[in-house]
Image (cartoon, rainbow, N blue to C red):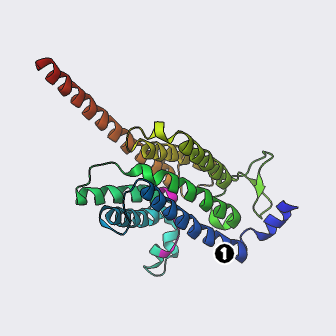
């Protein structure tokens, strides 16, 4: 019974309205949880000093990355653009928002001379936002273009066109729920090194999208038949690997210098 009701509602004006509301709810819930995390650590208001700079950097970076990666994923839609503002109004990408927000925060920290790693406070808000946002994507049905390819598996979902498909939105929602539970359960261990939790989140999400987008329709195929988002994820993972290697070398060099000082003393 509920499947028939879903097929009738998917992609309807009501479903699209719910999708939009859940997107805004995801952003609001993430912002609320981030402010709560900062208050618990007595880090001050988001509207003052360091917090304000980081928030602005995050929002601007996420806005740019959001749109840029969408157009990398859907370049064929550029032929339909009739006004320059359409480039800003059309589409969005979680991968682009996350990568852009990360770059924006790092640039803001560099401009402000902030050297401490602040990413761990974003882990829970991002995961909560993904959970709420992907529920909205699922309810939007075929309209949202986040569904999977046809499948014969028993949990395939008919989004209204008579074809059972992988409910990739639900896969991601359940993964984010599990990750959120694991973060709350083992945060002291995962965050023993500042920034480790955020790096694990980013690497894990990029790996997930590289894999799960392989069972989604590809709107525009690049090399190896990969989508634009898959290539963005692969490049992001390479950058993260390079940064991890750089940090490991710095750590090893610092340990060696400390050992030398100890020997001389």
**Residue 28 visible:** yes
Q: Which residue is mark 1?
A: 17
* Residue 110 located within the stretch drawn in magenta: no
- Answer left or right for 111 relative to 39: left
Picture quadrant of residue 241? top left
Asked which secondary structure carries label 1, the reply is helix
Q: How many marks?
A: 1
Image x and y of residue 94, in percent: 51, 59
Residue at (58, 55) in percent of width and height: 218
The residue depicted at 48 percent of the width and 46 percent of the height is: 201
Which residue is the extreme one toward the bottom? 83
Q: Quadrant of the N terminus?
A: bottom right
Seen as rendered, the residue at the extreme left is 264
The front one of 97 and 187 is: 187
Residue 103 locus on image (x, y percent): 35, 56
Q: Magenta span covers which residues?
A: 89-96
For the point 66% across and 57% down, the residue is: 147
Q: Quadrant of the C terminus?
A: top left
Q: Position of residue 203 (x, y in %)?
A: 46, 43
Residue 224 in sight: no
Seen from the viewer's position, the closer of residues 231 and 222 is: 231
- Would you place residue 216 above or below residue 21 in this image? above
Q: Position of residue 44 (x, y in %)?
A: 36, 61
Q: Residues within 10 Å of mark 1 (few under 14, many from 20)?
A: some
């Amino acid at each position: 019974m509920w499947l028939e009701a879903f097929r009738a509602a998917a992609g309807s004006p009501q479903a699209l309205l719910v999708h939009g509301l859940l997107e805004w709810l995801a952003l609001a819930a993430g912002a609320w949880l981030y402010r709560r995390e900062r208050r618990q650590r007595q880090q001050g208001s988001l509207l003052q000093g360091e917090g304000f700079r980081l928030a602005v950097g995050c929002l601007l970076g996420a806005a740019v990355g959001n749109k840029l990666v969408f157009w990398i994923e859907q370049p064929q839609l550029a032929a339909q653009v009739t006004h320059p503002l359409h480039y800003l109004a059309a589409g969005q990408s979680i991968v682009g928002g996350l990568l852009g927000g990360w770059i924006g925060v790092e640039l803001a920290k560099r401009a402000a001379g902030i050297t401490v790693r602040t990413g761990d406070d974003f882990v829970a808000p991002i995961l909560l936002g993904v959970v709420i946002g992907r529920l909205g994507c699922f309810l939007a049905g075929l309209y949202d273009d986040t569904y999977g390819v046809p499948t014969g598996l028993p949990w395939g979902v008919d989004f209204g066109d008579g074809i059972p498909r992988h409910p990739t939105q639900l896969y991601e929602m359940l993964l984010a729920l599990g990750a959120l539970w694991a973060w709350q359960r083992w945060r002291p261990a995962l965050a023993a090194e500042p920034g480790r939790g955020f790096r694990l989140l980013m690497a894990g999400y990029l790996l997930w999208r590289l894999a799960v987008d392989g069972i989604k329709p590809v709107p525009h195929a690049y090399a190896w038949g990969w989508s634009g988002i898959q290539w963005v994820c692969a490049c992001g993972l390479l950058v993260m690997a390079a940064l991890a290697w750089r940090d490991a070398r710095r750590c090893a060099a610092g340990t060696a210098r400390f050992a030398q000082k100890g020997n001389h003393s």
